Image (cartoon, grey):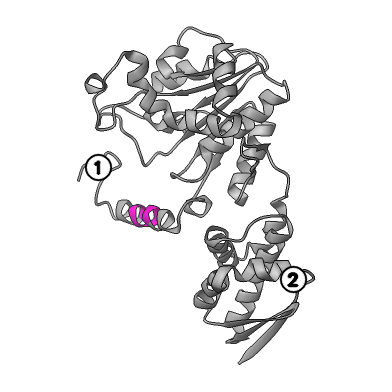
Amino acid sequence: MAERIINVDRLEAVLDLFGNYDENINIIQKEYSVAVLSRGGDIKISGDEENVYNASKAIEALLELASKGEQINEQNIRYVISLVKEGAHEELHKLTADGICVTISGRIVKPKTLGQKKYVEAIRDNTIVLGVGPAGTGKTYLAVAMAVKAFRAHEINKIILTRPAVEAGEKLGFLPGDLQNKVDPYLRPLYDALFEMLGPDTFAKQQERGCIEVAPLAYMRGRTLDDSFIILDEAQNTTPEQMKMFLTRLGFNSKIVITGDITQIDLPDSRRSGLIEAIKVLKDVDDIAQIRFTEKDVVRHKLVQDIIKAYEKFYEKGNVNHHGKG
C-alpha cells in the first residue's frame, strides 16, 4: 500500500477539488481505485503505488486549473484523466487564465482544452483556419468569440457567419414562411452564439447597421469581403465548387475560419465534400492553419465523448460509410 500527501495552500481549492458531496473526488477515487482524504490543507492519497502516482498527478493538475479560476467539474476531471494517461498533464500550464471575451451574462469565454487553445492561437496568427473535428469541441463557439473580440477591438468592421443550407433529412420546401424563415433554422446555432456574447439588443442593432450578417453560403457569391471576420460553419456540407467560391471571397484585412465535422456529411452520395478537398489542397499553403480536434476536446456531457468514440469504432470496422449507407 502506497501513500502520498499533497499540501494545498488554499482551503477553498480543496473544497473545489472535492466538490459537493465529494462528487468530484469520487470520480478520481473510482478511476484510480484509490482513497483520497482531506486533512486541513493536506490531501492524502492511498492505494497501489502506480494508481497513487497517477491520481496525484491528476489532482495536482486539477488544483492548477482551480488556481487559474477554472471551476472543477466532471468534464475537466475526465479531460485531466485522459491527459495523465498520455503523460501530457504537464502541458496544462499552457491553459492560461486569459479569456477571449465576456458574454452578456458576465461569463469569460476561454479555451478549456489544449486543442481549443491551439485553435484560438491559430485563429489569432493566421488569415485562414480550418477547424475540423466532432460535435461539442467548441469549433464554432470559439470562432464566434474570436470574431466578437476582433469586432469590439475595432480590428474588423463586420462579422459574417454563414452555412451551406443542405437539407439533412428535412425538406426546405415543407418549412413555413419565406426564404429567410426557411434558412433561419440552419443558422440558429450561429445566432445563439452571437446572442450569448452580444445580447439580443446589441445583435439586432449591429445587424441593422450591416455590421453583422448571418446568411446562407449562396449569399456570398460574387462578393469581396474586406475588413471582415468570416466564419463558414458545417463546411463538410459544401461542394468543392462552393468551397472554392467561398475561399476566394477573402478581401484585405479579413480573417476566415472554416469549421466542420467530416463524419457528419449530409451531401448526396455522388457529391464530394468541399471541406475534405480543401484539407488536402491547402495543407502546404502559408498563412492557412489546419487544427484537428479529437473526442478529448469535447466540452459537453461525458456521454458525448463516449458516443463519438463508439461511432468511430463502428466506422473503423467498415460497417457503414459516413453517408450512413451499409
In the image, 93 versus 157, the foreground residue is 157
Q: Position of residue 238 (x, y in %)?
A: 39, 25
Q: Position of residue 12 (x, y in %)?
A: 72, 67
Kind of residue indicated by mark 2: Leu
Kind of residue indicated by mark 1: Gly
Judged from the image, the secondary structure of the residue bearing numbered disc 2 is helix
**Which corner quadrant of the image does residue 268 belong to?**
top left
Could you tell which of marks 1 and 2 lies nearer the N-terminus? 2
Residue occupying image coordinates x 73% and y 49%: 97
Q: Residue furthest right?
A: 9
Tell me the quadrant of the picture where the N terminus can be found.
Answer: bottom right
Disc 2 crowd rating (10 Å Cα; few below 14, some 14-19, many 20+) is: few
Dot 1 and dot 2 residues touching (CB under 8 Å): no
Q: Is the magenta region chiefly helix, strand or loop?
A: helix
Q: For residue 11, which numbered disc appears in the image?
A: 2
Residue occupying image coordinates x 59% and y 63%: 80
Residue occupying image coordinates x 68% and y 17%: 253
Residue 191 in view here: yes
Q: Position of residue 284 (x, y in %)?
A: 58, 32
Residue occupying image coordinates x 57% and y 80%: 51
Residue 287 in view here: no
The residue segment tinted magenta is: 307-312
Q: Is residue 6 above or below residue 154?
A: below
Q: Position of residue 52 (x, y in %)?
A: 62, 81
Q: Is residue 182 above or below residue 84?
A: above
Say which of marks 1 and 2 sits in front. Answer: 2
Tell me how far mark 1 sits from mark 2, CA to CA. Answer: 52 Å
Judged from the image, the secondary structure of the residue bearing numbered disc 1 is loop
The residue at which mark 1 appears reads as 324
Q: Residue furthest top?
A: 222
- How many numbered discs? 2
Disc 1 crowd rating (10 Å Cα; few below 14, some 14-19, many 20+) is: few
